[in-house]
Amino acid sequence: MGKWMDGYLAKLGKIQQESIEGGGQERIQVQHGLGKLTARERIGKFVDPGTFEEIGSLVRDNRQPLDGKQRPSPYDGVITGFAQVNSRSVVLYSADFTVLSGSLGDQAAWKLADLARMAGQMQLPLIGIIDAAGERLSFKGGDIGLNGLAQFLRNYSLLSGIVPRISLVLGPCVGVSAVLPVLSDFSIIHRKRGFLWLGGDKQFADAGSAEFHMEKSGQCDLIAESDEEAIAMARKLLGYLPQNCWDKPPVVEMGDDPERREEDLLQIMPDDPRFTYDIHEIIERIVDKGEFFELKEGFANHLVIGFSRLGNQVCGLVANNPDELSGILEPDSSDKYDRFMNFLDAFNIPQINLVDTTAFPPGDKWERMGVIRHGAKLLHSYANLTCPKVTVVLRRSYGGANIVMGCSAMFPDFIYGWPTTEFAPTGPETVVHAVFHKELAKAKEEGKYDQVYNFLLNILKEQFSVLNLGKFWTTYYTVHEVIEPRDTRPRIIKALRALADKREALPDRKRSIKPA
């Protein structure tokens, strides 16, 4: 090798060493003191060993700061590249808080814009690890890089429905950049260190925290107790997702008998429909090995969503939870359901609905919250689903909730009902009071109220029972088959096998328009 190359290699070696050191040992110690990993340590734990290939390591911030003091800015504070995760290729970036507090510089924004474009071209999942103090503002001339940021956000948005996008918020994420985790398909937020905030004054102590965005805004899918747990969650979540919308999710041999009948399912549901049960008890008994990866667990928990496998195949589960608010569909649970089903449809992941709900809640409170508008969004989304979809009605399926949970007239591919299933425009109890109020008033005067009420209620419940309605194939309320609870798992698995090559076309159009 000629001596002329030595100088170039020395310069390159110096730049590479700066990149390895990041913001310097002192800043790294501060990061560790806060219980946080560095940007490179996070990448190292997320990807398969030795597979990370960095791009953009030479990038630096070359603008003049207001105080005239030039600060080191290796890779302009954001490490970008591609790697393998469980032997699958991904594109990823990790903001480095040790470099100028992770603030987003002009060159870093353009680097991220190109990274998003590359993820789309390569059809690979895009993972973002965020620990950053917002956009970098303190430079002469007011050049804050918003043009590059806008390009990144546009490119990132254009990836929607093409490749999975996951954001890990392991530190602050503020300013315009705060929209990134919300634009993502899934967001994981560190319980103590994660902070998501657009701007303005804080009026509540918990505002911006992981709990706030899980329980109040619904913008958090998973809460992690540490960097390591957040990374483990992201790796596990990725295992349920395809590489892109044209690919299929990974098939994993779970070692669970597809013909397994679960006797315990006969004991979970209470004899009296006025009593509740936890839907998780049913989910855990029908999915492979009882493994259910729940999302948004702390938000609108009367509706349960998440990933599982049935017969080794990835499925998205949507289930009403009677143990919480009787499994109603109000605005928050509707939003939770709507976003999840649209993701499943975009990536052709089968949707399994487990139904036991008393419908949308009536009354002034809910009307003011826009219950009609949110319900209309669900109706629109379900009507446009083309992914495999299977409905299993467990007990009650009342009112408009029956429709958006996949009733027969919404054409799920398969709809099954337990013998306990009741279809009704509203609860039988409400119908009795509304239709027979005069008879009940007279019975009350005669001291026979309970006797008359129960007599009328039992007649209606018999009429609303699937064992009666199921006799009429063309009726609005029907099922393809009434099944034993013990057969729920094998029935769903056989349905999914039948749907392996399903094709469903929508009307030819540019796009549909969802209700506001």
Image (cartoon, grey):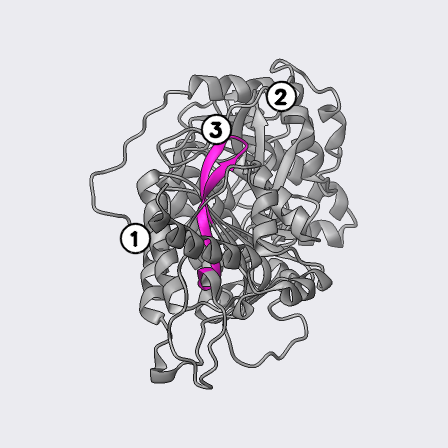
Determine the secondary structure under disc 1. loop
414 up-or-down from 11: above or below: above
Task: Please tell me the numbered disc located at residue 478.
Answer: 3
Q: Position of residue 471 (x, y in %)?
A: 49, 21
Q: What residue is shown with label 1?
A: 513
Q: CA distance from mark 1 to mark 3?
A: 29 Å
Determine the secondary structure under disc 2. loop
Q: What amino acid does circle 2 point to? A: Met
Q: What residue is shown with label 2?
A: 254
Mark 1 vs 3, N-terminal side: 3
Q: Which residues are magenta?
A: 75-92
The residue lying toward the viewer, choosing from 418 and 64, is 64
> Nearer the viewer's eye, disc 1 or disc 3?
1
Q: Residue at x 46, y 57 (%)?
A: 15
Mark 2 vs 1, N-terminal side: 2
Residue at the farthest right position: 447
